[in-house]
């Protein structure tokens, strides 16, 4: 007889290292997304005392291959589950490489309040000391927690809770690979208990103006990132400006680049390409008109968003407007 006091949590699996299998446990090599969702759930001790689980396999990819098509499927499924009164919360298992991008995307297009938690693992499921089972335990507990409502998608890794807008993968190996460099962690998990340190006061969820439908109708506007460094020339930017609707500069320091690159970006902006200046440094806030004259060049300052998140916001923004001033408004608020 099911325990009626327990929440019902939908677990949507997409692949990643959390579902990764090695040929043998001492091997460095493994295949991400090799194991099905049932296998992941069976490996978590005590899960049945936390929640009733309803599991679905949405995709089986390493998240380097996450795609617009899977994002659309995921967003539609999450939206339906949010409207289903029999579901209390949702967990998405995901590869760690692009987990922050999916979380941020969902924070802008899922206009609902139900707890939504994304989780991954740095070690394959077959490795000694696999971190997936503990992370999944925390994710299910968090998704069943009333305090998680209305905060937008949360990411739980290594006992830390992060807001979707803030979280970044900051290391390519090791279980402590996620941080929220600008505003800090949202909170921590202590066993099955969530403890929040802060509110999420940036725009997300119900307050977002963005929709999957508008994005699809606009054909997922193409936005590319150009990574700045010593000697960056104009040719790559000139090439992109005839192909992309938006360019994000992963600039040095405060979103800066060589004169040649900035002049090429100014030409792109004059041709109607939306140009966002972000920083390659990993934290801080890129503001308008500090070293670069954004007003004269027609640029948008990327604020606190990493280049990879600026790319997502610009894509969603371009589905609604091409006007740099309106796009700047999104970067000021989201
Ligand atoms: N590249 C794979 C992915 O993102 C493995 C990395 C991971 O999940 O930790 O799915």
Image (cartoon, helix red, strand yellow):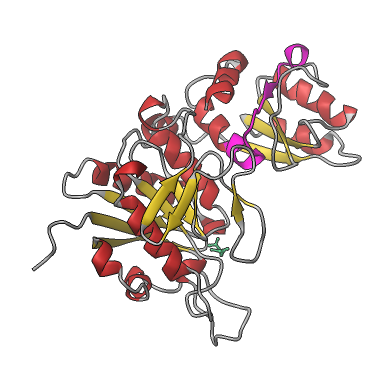
In the picture, the quarter occupied by the N terminus is bottom left
Residue 84 x, y percent position in the rendering: 19, 44
Instruction: Pick the residue in front: 37 or 215.
Output: 37
Outermost residue, top direction?
Answer: 296
Whether residue 61 is situated above or below residue 311 in the rendered picture: below
Is 300 within the magenta? Answer: yes
Residue 260 in picture, x, y percent from top left:
88, 29
Q: Residue at x 53, y 23 (%)?
A: 333
Residue 69 visible, this orientation: no
Query: Of residues 282 and 230, which is closer to you in this image?
Result: 282
Q: As drawn, which residue projects farthest toward the right?
A: 231
- In the rendered view, would you say 182 is above or below 27? above
User: Dividing the image into four equal quarters, which quarter contains ligand 1?
Assistant: bottom right
Residue in view at x 52 percent, y 63 percent: 62
Q: Is residue 231 visible?
A: yes
Q: How many marks?
A: 0
Is residue 266 rendered magenta in the image? no
The image quarter containing residue 312 is: top right
Query: Which of the 4 image quarters holds residue 25?
Result: bottom right
From the top left corner, tell me how far across and down residue 108 is, in percent: 44, 34
Residue 229 is left or right of residue 156, and the answer is right
Q: Quadrant of residue 325?
A: top right
Q: Is residue 160 left or right of residue 223?
A: left
Percent of width and height locating residue 56 = 29, 61
Point 58% across, 42% down: residue: 184
- Front-most of residues 203 and 232: 203
Above or below for 302 versus 18: above
**In this rendering, position of residue 178 left or right of residue 204:** right
Q: Residue at x 34, y 33 (%)?
A: 111
| Part of the protein shown in magenta | 294-311
């Amino acid at each position: 007889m099911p325990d009626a006091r327990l929440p019902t949590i939908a677990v949507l699996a997409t692949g990643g290292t959390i579902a990764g299998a090695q040929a043998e446990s001492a091997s460095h090599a493994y295949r991400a997304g090799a194991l099905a969702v049932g296998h992941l759930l069976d490996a978590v001790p005590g899960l049945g005392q936390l929640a009733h689980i309803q599991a679905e396999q949405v995709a089986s990819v390493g998240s380097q291959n996450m795609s617009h098509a899977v994002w659309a499927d995921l967003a539609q499924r999450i939206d339906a589950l949010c409207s289903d009164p029999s579901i209390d919360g949702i967990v998405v298992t995901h590869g760690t490489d692009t987990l922050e991008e999916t979380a941020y995307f969902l924070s802008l297009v899922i206009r609902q309040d139900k707890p939504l938690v994304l989780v991954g693992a740095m070690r394959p499921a077959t490795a000694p000391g696999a971190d997936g089972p503990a992370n999944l335990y925390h994710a299910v507990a968090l998704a069943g927690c009333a305090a998680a409502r209305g905060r937008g998608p949360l990411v739980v890794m290594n006992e830390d809770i992060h807001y979707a807008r803030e979280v970044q993968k900051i290391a390519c190996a090791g279980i402590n690979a996620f941080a929220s460099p600008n505003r800090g962690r949202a909170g921590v998990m202590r066993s099955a208990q969530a403890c929040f340190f802060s509110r999420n006061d940036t725009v997300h969820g119900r307050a977002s103006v963005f929709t999957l439908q508008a994005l699809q109708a606009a054909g997922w506007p193409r936005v590319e990132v150009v990574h700045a460094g010593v000697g960056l020339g104009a040719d790559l930017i000139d090439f992109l400006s005839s192909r992309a609707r938006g360019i994000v500069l992963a600039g040095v320091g405060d979103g800066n680049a060589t004169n040649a690159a900035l002049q090429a970006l100014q030409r792109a902006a004059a041709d109607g390409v939306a140009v966002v200046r972000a920083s390659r440094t990993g934290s801080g806030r890129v503001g308008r008109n500090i070293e670069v004259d954004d007003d004269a060049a027609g640029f948008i300052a990327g604020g606190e968003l990493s280049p990879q998140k600026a790319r997502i916001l610009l894509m969603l923004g371009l589905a609604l407007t091409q006007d740099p001033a309106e796009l700047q408004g999104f970067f000021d608020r989201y």
